[in-house]
Amino acid sequence: MYYLSIEESFSSAHQLKNYQGKCENLHGHNWRIILTVKGERLNDIGLLIDFHELKDILQSILQELDHTNLNALPYFKEQNPSSENIAAYLFEKIIICLKKNGHSQTSVESVTVYESATSSCTYKKE
């Protein structure tokens, strides 16, 4: 099994609904994302997926989130834009993009969302 990881970042604001504390107020983060994909088969030139293509996929999704108030996005209208929910959101969107781009042999292993240098959440499906 081959595992590839890339890192990207974006900035946005959010507030946690029904939270008792400072994070209930609108505030921002410089989020850092680590995406790990996996697969058993390499292509004809020995790659699972080109790093540039994988970064393009992740960046296209992050553009929707960058410099926004996450609470205003349709996905986060009903649920909190927590690190946990952001990781799950990205995970599902990346699956769709990989399939759309012809990478059905490559699957998402995990998405890690850092909301600060010392606080993160990793989402993966068992």
Image: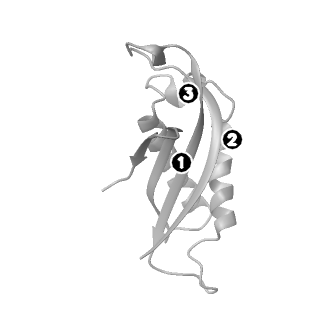
Mark 2 against mark 3, which lies toward the viewer?
2
> Circle 2 sits on which residue?
63
Q: CA distance from mark 2 to mark 3?
A: 15 Å
Lateral position of residue 57 relative to residue 94, left or right:
right
The residue depicted at 43 percent of the width and 55 percent of the height is: 110
**Picture coordinates of residue 42 (x, y %)?**
54, 81
- Residue type at mark 3? Pro
Residue 81 is labelled as none
Mark 1 against mark 2, which lies toward the viewer?
2
Q: Most extreme residue toward the front, as rendered?
A: 118
Q: Are marks 3 and 1 in contact (CB under 8 Å)?
A: no
Which quadrant holds the N terminus? Answer: bottom left
- Return the disc, 1 or 2, that comes first in the chain's sequence: 2
Residue 109 falls in image quadrant: bottom left
- Return the disc, 2 or 3, that comes first in the chain's sequence: 2
> Circle 3 sits on which residue?
74
Name the element at disc 1: helix
Q: Would you place residue 54 above or below residue 73 in this image?
A: below
Q: Is residue 89 visible?
A: no
Q: Is residue 118 visible?
A: yes
Lateral position of residue 90 relative to residue 124, left or right:
right
- Residue type at mark 1? Lys
> Circle 1 sits on which residue?
93
